[in-house]
Image: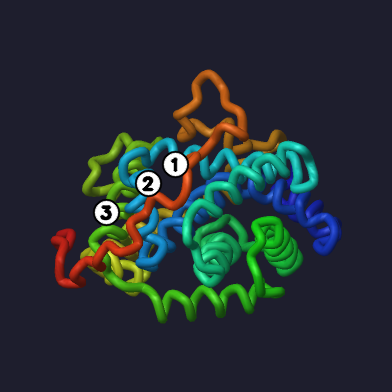
Amino acid sequence: MNRYALRDHTDRLDAQTQYEEIVRILSTQEFPWDIEQALSFALFRTYAVPSIGVLLHETGEFNQRTQKRYDDTVLILDAILEHGMASQAGRNAFRRMNQMHGAYDISNDDMRYVLSTFVVTPVRWLAEFGWRPFTPHEVEAWTRYYHAVGRHMGIQDIPETFDAFAALMDGYEARHFAFDARSRAVADATLELLATFSPSHLAPKNLVNLFARTLMDDALLDAFHYARPSALSRTAFRLALKARGKFVRYALSPRSEPLFGRGRPNIRSYPNGYAVEQLGTFPKGCPVNHGAPAADASSGARQRQ
């Protein structure tokens, strides 16, 4: 298959009506590894907003059962992607996701922000590290897909364009990124998990940690009190990712069969299978102590390079 065959195919589809098929091709055939990494970092960014990171910490899920929470998130979204939003599996996945979110006091602004990271981060990742960037047609389809996801989640005042999503994400982070030791704990647990994924598990943990930090902007690093990597480290690791993109471009053929989340080796919690309706948590009422004092911004040891 021609290296650009899938791009040519997505550009022939209608971005306004066939956005689910376009996103399915992008996520499972054209850029499965890149989009997996980008969405992992998208979720990671949200921890730096204390109202989100502290909530995740107080549930005890993301720092005590990190692998399962990661798997559940991937598999719920995977059901929507694979089967479609209107399918029974898609409706079950939305119902499960909305039940979990509905048990907590989450603002519409925070929900919109999280949605914006899923729109913006993959587009920016591929522009910098992918073997090619999204085409404008694909960006429109990607944006429409997540706009529809947001509607099914009951989110209000969703941006209509990619540029509006990008402005929302960047502005929200500029206003709300801040240090909290509990958010930092969730971030640390996530980095620990990522170090166990293949092929990272073959490298020393401190090297994997450094690699992850070279991909974070200074505002994100500062929000977690993570040490800023040296310019040399940033350059070396980012060039390595760019080199991977070149390798994919010139040495690999397009994936002929889709790779859905349930088939990825990093999903490890359900060796005997699962039902979407049983994924996630089933809290009765909001188990979070909303009166807990905020952590002192000066507390928490800074991570050393």
Of marks 3 and 1, which one's residue comes earlier in the chain?
1
Q: Pointers 2 and 3 in contact (CB under 8 A)?
A: no
- Dot 2 alpha-carbon crowd within 10 angstroms: few under 14, some 14 to 19, many 20 or more: many
x, y percentage for residue 6? 75, 49
Is the N terminus in the top left, top right, bottom left or bottom right quadrant?
Answer: top right
Identify the mark at residue 69; answer none if there is no mark.
1
Q: Amino acid at mark 2?
A: Phe
Is the C terminus in the top left, top right, bottom left or bottom right quadrant?
Answer: bottom left
Q: Pointers 1 and 2 in contact (CB under 8 A)?
A: yes
Residue beneath disc 3: 185
Identify the mark at residue 1; answer none if there is no mark.
none
x, y percentage for residue 225? 23, 66
x, y percentage for residue 169? 52, 73
In the rendered image, is residue 171 in sight? yes
Reply above or below: 111 against 90.
Answer: below
Q: Quadrant of residue 46?
A: bottom left
Residue beneath disc 2: 62
Q: Amino acid at mark 3?
A: Ala
Q: CA distance from mark 2 to mark 3?
A: 9 Å
Q: Residue at x 25, y 68 (%)?
A: 294
